[in-house]
Amino acid sequence: MNLFRNFKSVTKTCYGRGSFGKLGEILEPQRSANDGFMVFVVDDYFEHKDDFVKRIPEMEGDEIHFISALKEPTTELIDNLRDDILKRRGLPAGIVGIGGGSMMDIAKAASLMFTNEGSSVQYQGLNLIKKPGIYHCGVPTISGTGAEVSMTAVLTGPVKKLGLKCDWTVFDQIVLDPDLIASVPTDQWFYTGMDTYIHSVEAITGTKKNTFAEAYSEKSLEMCREVFMRMDRKDVKSDEFLMVASYMGGLSLTYSEVGVCHALSYGLGKVLEIHHCIANCIAFDKLEDVYGDYVQEFKGMVAHNKVHIPQGLAKDWSEETISAMAEVAYNLPHMWDHAFGPDWQKVLDRERIKGWYRRM
């Protein structure tokens, strides 16, 4: 099919064990910009892990903000962070996200909002940002979301859950150090890792699939099978495979799109505040009619790793809740267009979406 996308990739990528130790050296040339200080947004999981915090290359005048990832990033969080720092300190030289997908998205969104006026709510969508952001760098400490390489910073706003998406969202620098993901608890490791598996499946099972997306997806799926079906979690190569699979799963979407599972996941996230990666697993587990053998393979990975996917949730949901989630999901036309084509409204209505939710 003909699909024109002229996309921007991450400007610089540093990969390898121990590369986190080079972060100070990487940031040094950027420190003279604007008011000359760096902002680090770090998952509060690390707040009391002194050995890790000491490794963050904080210099005099820099700020470290420990932020909880229990709830996904909101437009309010981004606006408040931006307003607070600008009022107290002025414009940072750059911002560095250290953590999972939430910290990546916070760093990307805040970078843009430091230079764009008003609330981030008005920029939720494609190419709505008016000016490039400040320098921004991502250091993932858990792998799967692909947020380190995507051109989207997903935020939950008062009305919708939708990303700030443009070329300027993409990181200027990422540091991929497999050592950083070695201590992730098994359940979280699995749920987040499945995000890249699902990205890769969705990228190549919709109407926008193409050779470019397939190349990244197929390799990502191959590595996911190694990690989640064949390797021991303690295998030193496991973290390397998953970190690269996450990167490739994210790139597979650059020239394709996500589909049914992600649309349903956004409804679960917006209405029930279920974290994105586990929401994906809850949804994908019930989508055999859409993704066929991939769902069976997913169930095999769940069993192999002895991971629990929540079941029977829908029995506690009111019709009002299901309708609200269906409304959020229905209003993501770019995902349904990929899943079912430009005439998706002829084969999909809110009742069909509610049917998927009732299975969960």
Image (tube, rainbow, N blue to C red):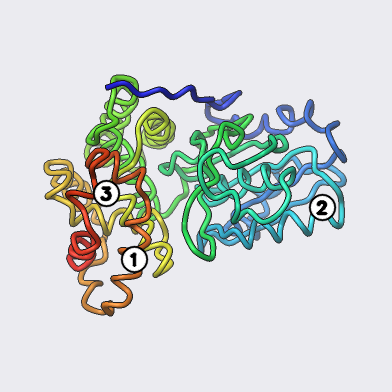
Position of residue 63 measured from the top left corner of the image (x, y, whole percent): 78, 51
Position of residue 121 measured from the top left corner of the image (x, y, whole percent): 59, 56
Q: Residues within 10 Å of mark 1 (few under 14, many from 20)?
A: many
Q: What secondary structure is marked by label 2?
A: helix
Q: What secondary structure is marked by label 3?
A: helix
Q: Quick one: 360 or 31, which is closer to the camera?
A: 360
Q: Which mark is residue 325?
A: 1
Q: Work out how far the residue at label 1 is from the one at label 2, CA to CA, in angstroms.
A: 36 Å
Judge depth for marks 1 and 2 and give the one in front.
1
Q: Give the residue at mark 2.
A: 86
Q: Residues within 10 Å of mark 3 (few under 14, many from 20)?
A: many
Position of residue 256 measured from the top left corner of the image (x, y, whole percent): 35, 31
| Residue plotted at (73% across, 52% down) | 64
Amino acid found under the numbered disc labelled 1? Met
Quadrant housing residue 285: bottom left
Disc on the earlier residue, 1 or 2? 2
Amino acid found under the numbered disc labelled 2? Leu
Q: Give the residue at mark 3.
A: 260
